[in-house]
Amino acid sequence: MSGDKLLRGVRINAQPMTRPVRIDGHTTVPRLLRARAQENGDHPAHREKDLGIWQAYSWTDYLHHVRLIGMGLRALGLKRGDVISILSEDNKEWMYCDMAAQCMGAVSSGVYTTDSASQLAYLVNDSGSKFLFVENEEQLDKFLEVADQMPGLQRVIIFDPEGLHAFAHDKCMLLSDLYEMGRQTDDEALFNAEIDAVQPGDVGVLIYTSGTTGQPKGVQITQENILAGMETSLYGLPFQKHAEQLCFLPLCHILERIVSLYTPLVVSSTVNFAESPETVFDNLREISPHGFVAVPRVWEKIYSRVLVMAQEATPLGRWAFARALKAGQARAAYTMEGRPVPGGTALRYRIWDFLVLANLRRMLGMDRIAQGLTGAAPISPELLKWYHAIGVPLYEGFGMSETTGVATINLPGHNKVGSVGRPNPGVEVRIADDGEIQVKGLNVFGGYLNKPEKSAEAFTPDGWLRTGDVGRIEDGYLTITGRIKDIIITAGGKNITPAEIESRLKFSHYISDAVVIGDRRKYLTCLIMIDQENVEKFAQDNKVPFSDFRSLCRAEPVLDLIRREVEDVNREFARVEQIKDFRLIDVLLTAEDEELTATMKLKRATVETRHKALIDAMY
Amino acid sequence: MTALLEVRNLETFYGPIMAIRGVSLEVHKGQVVTVLGANGAGKTTLLKTISGIMDPEKGQVLFEGREIQGREPHQIVRRGIVQVPEGREVFPLLTVEENLALGAYTRTDKAEIARDRDLVFSYFPILAERRLQEAGTLSGGQQQMLAIGRGLMLRPKIMLLDEPSLGLSPLLTQEIFTILKRLNTDEGVTMMLVEQNAAVALDLADQGYVMELGRIVMADSAEKLAASEDIQSFYLGHANEGARGERRWKKRKTWR
């Protein structure tokens, strides 16, 4: 038995990824929650905006609500191992329900609010959910639309009663009624017994992977997986005790789930729920979190906003910003590689930081961020550098639902731009003969729900997880080049990894995503989704008339702009890997569209079928 | 064919507030083009920028191929652009006839003016009946007719109509739009029509644009716009009642 060690004030196994995985001596999420609620008592556990004012809810309050929901569900007939589904935007109730399910030995599964009614029916049926929590009448209507297709569903619980006073349905009830039920059957000893009965091997969470092909698969994550993921992340994630965090990506996604629901249990940080996806940037400014984890799209948006602000500033302001950025970039060249900064460069940065950059960070709500993290999609090295230059050290990591969050990460002093960093302590990563990245560790999941053959495919005979990504390891740093399934074999017989070309295209500010096509074709082409904001700005600045999005995509100067971007990328690739032609997707896609994953990435298969006409026109 | 009126990348501000954030559109001769949008979308600002009441920060307004942005309103009127303002702003203390005469103040050809006045009276017989009455004592619908008639008195190449249906009963709205239709088909008057009443506007127009927060989010033939799902649910009030039959929430707009 190895000893313990303290890391960021948390006691963990000295040897990472050894059984039993313990965080301050606790082996499951429910036990950890109970302990933290007792320790932190009246300190705010989370905040939510109510009528425009941030309201804090204490740790005691947190556990109390979890207990009421847990006991209420028990009274309704929830048994250990049952599944509940949650269909809601991020809010405290989401968190309570997730924890309540786990405390009662049940499994919690999230459904994206952008999913359609039929997708909801699939997820509820596949997971075998007995209970479904819905946020409001909008989400309730999805249930009602497919109510008869979900025979196993026993109850639907509605968070927000607004507009539903006259509504009655024999399967539906309000959350307030569930609380009341919990109050009537409340029994602390019984609740504690339920928590104690949860074993590290129990599945606690189901994460449905968006899956760029086929139906979503339910990734079964055990208590041990979560704790192992947390333990190893503790080495890298920047959160300190009582740090402030902002929760805004969908909680159904592994990234936000880990960062906003489970990390706070480890480091006792405070989670602030963004009001809505539209107000994230305002909320960011109000909260000024200590850590910020986001997908590249979000980082890109913030960058674009600053550029626009800078362009609209006074000449003096523009000049000062340009000088400050230059000083920042000079310093970033050293800090990003962990080299010591020469005195002159450091001094120049200090001055410009004081005059400009510190104010910029304050305006963005990034003045307290010691370390930013990006993941779930490739990010442009220029963007990383820009953030370092303005004093927000941003690092890239890699992880997936199957590895319960972050598996590899770049860290201050251990950073290689373009790579996704080194494996977290205790996580083993290897590259197979065909180039596939394979992962092993206690954070790796056991299998997909109801899909034994898919689960078998997910592992090598010696028990390593096949990530489906191809890449390489250099000096311990992992670089991802693409998806194995997406490898294109051209008519000429050449193997091409489209993701490599696609990420290069995406690094352009005018291209938000791209899909390279060319399997069994003579040459490569691609479909491009333009970045609406930046291209609109380009059109405005260059007097290119356009009315709606479609006409923007058809404007000749816009096509020329994208053509130049494509040509720039082409220059970096060998002849057979060059894009010969492209088309713009002239519909403004939203998260509701099937072409996009929850993290706003284009789904190759869907795009290829939906836009077949555009593709065929290029051959 | 070049457009009679062309707006390119227009940006107009109220102090620090950007009311029009890059609008481009075209009106061809003989067409009726409508711009739909909710309150505060920037529709009126757009008309005011075209007619010279406001100056754009960026962008061009081309009329018969020539740039006219930033010119004084009286110069623009002389080129043949007439704006019929929102809220039927007639001169209340002048008579109907005097109001009409003012509409023709840039013209000198007395005989032609008289003919045009008769034309207005033929389209709006009620105005003929009340020709000597003070405009302020007319009903709302009659004042709107007078405002349109006053605009016609200039023999404009294009009429910019700012919400002619505002504050009118459905019946009167119908009546005025029928007359507008006749003016377009019989007299060939080109019109740019800003409206909140999408049903009547799309019925009249050939081409339509939808504005939201100072931007154009949709552009198409009036027919296609009227068939679009978003226009139906957000502008034409066709509600999808949903499973409960009393849906309050609206789905997100996609504008396609």
Image (cartoon, rainbow, N blue to C red):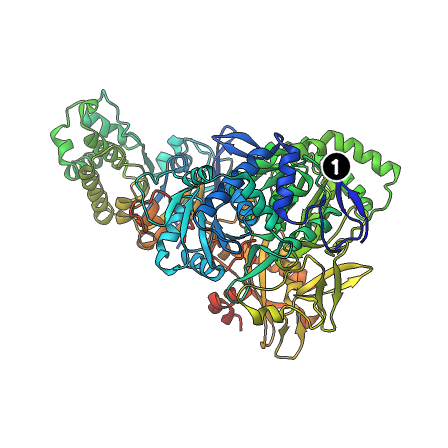
Q: Chain of mark 1?
A: A
Q: Is residue A528 above or below residue A232?
A: below
**Front-most of A252 and A534?**
A252
> Circle 1: is it few (<14), some (14-19), or many (20+) Cα within 10 Å?
some
Q: How many numbered tags mark residues here?
A: 1
Q: Which residue is depicted at the point 46% across and 69% down?
A: A613
Is there any visible trace of residue B29 in the rendered image? no
Q: Is residue B83 above or below residue B251?
A: above
**Front-most of A425 and A228?**
A228
**Residue bearing the label numbered 1:** A323
Residue A38 location, quadrant: top right
Residue A265 location, quadrant: top right
Is there any visible trace of residue B132 in the rendered image? yes
Residue B81 location, quadrant: top left
**Quadrant, the C terminus of chain B:** bottom left
Residue A24 is situated, as x and y percent measured from the top left of the image, at: 72, 43
Residue B251 is situated, as x and y percent measured from the top left of the image, at: 39, 48
Q: Is A3 left, or right, of B69 in this rendering?
A: right
The kind of secondary structure element at disc 1 is helix
Residue A411 is situated, as x and y percent measured from the top left of the image, at: 77, 48
The amino acid sitting under disc 1 is Arg
Q: Residue furthest bottom?
A: A492
Q: Which residue is depicted at the point 71% across and 52% down?
A: A21
**Front-most of A393 and A613?**
A393
Q: Is B242 left, or right, of A94 in this rendering?
A: left
